[in-house]
Image (cartoon, helix red, strand yellow):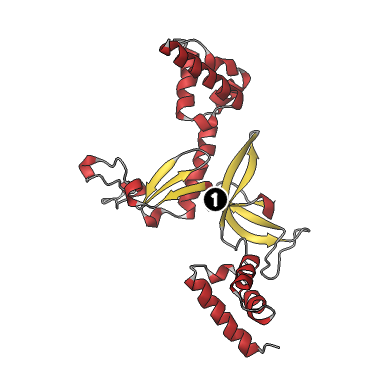
Amino acid sequence: MATSASISTLRKQVVEELGWRKLDPARYNVTAIARESYVTGNGSQETWDAAVKKNRYPYLIGDTVRVVVEIDGFQEHLYGAIRSFRTADNRTYKRRTLNPHSAYVDLFERSGVLRPLTEITPELDDFEIVTDHSEVHRDGPEHNYGIWACLRGRAHAYAPPADVMVTHKASGEMRRWCNDCNTPELRAELGHYMWWQRQRCMKTIRRLIDNPQEIAGPVGDWDAEDARGWADVFPYLVPAEAAALYEQWKERNRERVAA
């Protein structure tokens, strides 16, 4: 039977091994990994991998996550930080657990919400982050030697070069930032852009929900042209039926031009 001293040694070994693999020990139940890998297990790579996979905390207090909240009849993606984990009867866990039932999320832009863990998404899952220098600075401005500056840095006397290109997958909105600006809070702000734009464009959206045929009106019709111009700028906000009609309209016009 393993002694407390030997468990302590094994814990240190596990922490070192996680570090070598560039895994954050704080996100793992280190004691459980030590026991399952080296005490009850045979110490093999297979046993280690299974223990690491099994004993990773899916979320920690303070993690930035995304939840879905219904606002004005629309399912909006909102971001916030986990403040506590709750049991099925809404009690707060007294210790860390690998499988909490739900979490209270303190939203950045609205009051907090309680959600089952199955309805919570890590904010990083919503973004594509490119770090390759040639991709980040593709088509960079000639006046700046082909280097894009950090978008947030423009408010200062000197804007540092961009290090990353961050794209919100659902909307396609992209920002170039330096590493210091590539934070969960600023990514959440980028993710909220779709919600903010929907609020600003609600009149147009409601109009196209009520009359989707408007977007397929003839060339020169002011309302139709206005709707199509708006749809080109915010394709991710166009109601589904209007979007389908607009695609059909564009296809007909391509055929007409080709003929």
| Helix, strand or loop for disc 1 | helix
Q: Position of residue 76 (x, y in %)?
A: 60, 40
Q: Which residue is nearer to you in this view: 60 or 256?
A: 256
Q: In this view, does 76 lie above or below 13?
A: above
204 on left or right of 74: left
**Residue 155 seen in the current view:** no
- On the image, numbered disc 1 is attached to which residue? 125
Where residue 193 appears, as percent x and y from the top left, is 49, 40
Residue in view at x 50 percent, y 14 percent: 252
Question: Residue lying furthest right in this view?
Answer: 89
Q: Quadrant of the N terminus?
A: bottom right
Q: Where is residue 66 in the image (x, y as percent from the top left)?
A: 58, 49
Residue 23, visible in the rendered structure: yes
Horizontally, residue 119 falls left or right of residue 158, namely right
| 186 and 3: which is toward the camera | 3
Q: Residue at image x 59%, y 82%?
A: 10
Vertical arrangement, residue 45 with respect to residue 199, above or below: below
Viewer-side residue, 60 vs 56: 56
Of the residues shown, which amino acid type is indicated by label 1? Asp
Q: Position of residue 19 (x, y in %)?
A: 49, 72
Q: Which quarter of the image is occupied by the C terminus?
A: top left
Q: Nearer the viewer, residue 60 or 44?
A: 44
Residue 33, quarter of picture: bottom right
Depicted 131 relative to depicted 218: above or below: below
- Residue 256 falls in image quadrant: top left
- Residue visible at 45% across and 29% down? 233
Number of residue marks? 1
Mark 1 surroundings: few (<14), some (14-19) or many (≥20) residues within 10 A: few
